[in-house]
Image: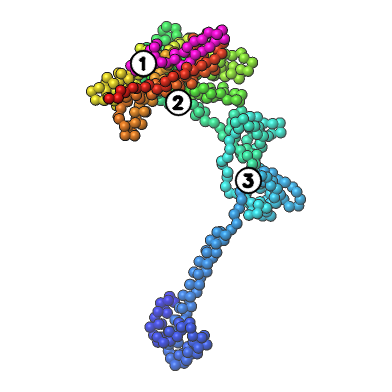
Amino acid sequence: MPRRTSSSSRQTIPDDVTKMLCDESLPLEARYAMLSEFRQNQPELATHVDRYLLGRMSAQSEGLRRAERSFKEMENVLAKLTEPPLHPAIYVASAETGAVPTAMIAHGNAWRVIPIADDLDPESLAVGDAVLLNQDLSAVIRKSPMVVCFGEVAAFDHFTEDGRMLVRRGEQEEVIGLADGVPREDWQPGDLVRWDRTARLGFERIRRAEGQEFRVEQVEDIDADRVGGRARQTLDQLVSALMLMMSQKKVARKYGLLDGKQLGILMIGPPGCGKTLMARVSAAQVQRNLGRRCNICVVKPGQFEDPYVGVTQRRIRECFKALRDAGEFGLLFLDEVESIARVRGGSMSQHGDKFLAALLAEMQGFATDGDSGIVVIAATNRVDLIDPALVERLEMQFEIRRPDMRSARQILPIHLQEQFPYHPNGDQAARTRLDLIELVVSRLYAPNADNDLCTIRFRDNTQRVVNCREVVSGRILEQVCREARRRAAFREVAGGVEGVCLDDVEHALADTLDKLRGQLALHNVRQYLADLPQDMDIVAVEPVQRRVTRRHQYVNGV
């Protein structure tokens, strides 16, 4: 309203008077004198002048109020920007040092004893609370609104007599306290505790998710053509055994095979001969035969073991439970079972004895359950190290041998497939592929080839020359083919000739033989050669030094 009045008044007040009223450069006394003279000369316009002045005063007052609000907002922003930072810390305990309440806090990598601010009640602070310190780190000014929910994790071991907690982190042991509010009941060895290294306090118990450390997944649809050589016949027998134990319960009961004595299957064979692959392929074949989902859980050595008493047994139970809960049909594959089921009775094997007993108990539970579709397959290359109690219960045993020359000819086409490029290519590609396969077979198996690996010397001064065909495996054949394909790919990327050629296979064979010569040593030669006499000590394993490491080609000059 005042602004409209001022606008209407400006239409009746002469312009020179309005200009005079708005002219801030004129002295106040001069403007007052001019205004008084105007009122005397034109009294009928005095009311309009008053309205005009009141309108200007109202507008200026509103402008001042807006400016004041903006100024206060700027002051608040400036205060926040220039406010000294506060420092987070952890309240450890009260520390009565005099008349002023003080607290022991953990900040950075040290403990401090500092006063508590007057407006903060010391009784409101609990051990483990997050607090804020002033800029100088000289006082606790208030509790922090933020709840710290992160930190290091250690494994609980036990409580001391005075209520402190012993935790382990790797090989280190730490004694810590517990923050207020953390329960002290129902702690089990191996439980995880979140703790702060500086405050030496535990804040939270983190329970492990049961079975999450063991990956249970649906069996991948792998074709049986992935298995070749001697293992193919064994694969068919393995599939029949799994079908009998998983789905053909009536047939097994008819022949009295559901008596709880058969706990699973044992696969025996040297490393790299396809035990894990055969387990996956056989499970995939069973899944196709049943037309229903089949799960598999592959347990590597060490996944069960734990240094804490009782944790290993708990992990075994969790693994079997996870596989049982995943579905009706499942396969548990224990790889390198000799590392977790060694012969019992040694002076240092009390923990392993309890572990094996728990494993046998869980396997027995599956075997006696007539409705269970879970089968355990254990794989090993050192059956002599496995406890007889487990070997006897794994009645169905399959031996996977190293591939001979005939088996190698069946395995190599799996890794040198027809769709790969070869050089010479085109119409000669098929012939080239066969020539490469024959080259690998002849170099690895021919008795007159340069494929000696090492010489084993025994204590009775006898010796034995180890040939490549004695240690070759399906994995080694795959590595030769993969290395040859990799060399061909590198050459094509560099702008060279496309396709796997004879030279690629020659170099791959040479590299593989050199690698095998370096792998055979005094401490592991018995793992590669199971037929070595046990009553004769080996004193040396000497690699055979090749005079020519690569094939030479001689070109006659014209």
Q: Left of 133 or right of it: where is 295? A: left
Q: Which residues are magenta?
A: 438-467
Seen in the picture, residue 99 relative to 364 is either above or below; the reply is: below
Q: Amino acid at mark 2?
A: Val
Q: Depth check: give the residue in front, 541 or 326.
A: 541
Which residue is rendered at x = 39% and y = 19% of the image? 477
Q: Amino acid at mark 3?
A: Gly
Q: Amino acid at mark 1?
A: Val
- The answer, for residue 373, to whether it is visible in the render is no
Assess disc 1: are there few (<14), some (14-19) or many (≥20) residues with their C-alpha within 10 Å of its C-alpha.
Answer: many
Disc 1 element: helix
Q: Position of residue 526 (x, y in %)?
A: 51, 14
Q: Depth check: give the residue in front, 244 or 53.
A: 244
Q: Left of 414 or right of it: where is 330? A: right
Disc 3 element: loop
The circle on residue 216 is 2
Q: CA distance from mark 1 to mark 3?
A: 66 Å
The circle on residue 441 is 1
Which residue is rendered at x = 61% and y = 38% of the image? 195
Assess disc 2: are there few (<14), some (14-19) or many (≥20) residues with their C-alpha within 10 Å of its C-alpha.
Answer: many
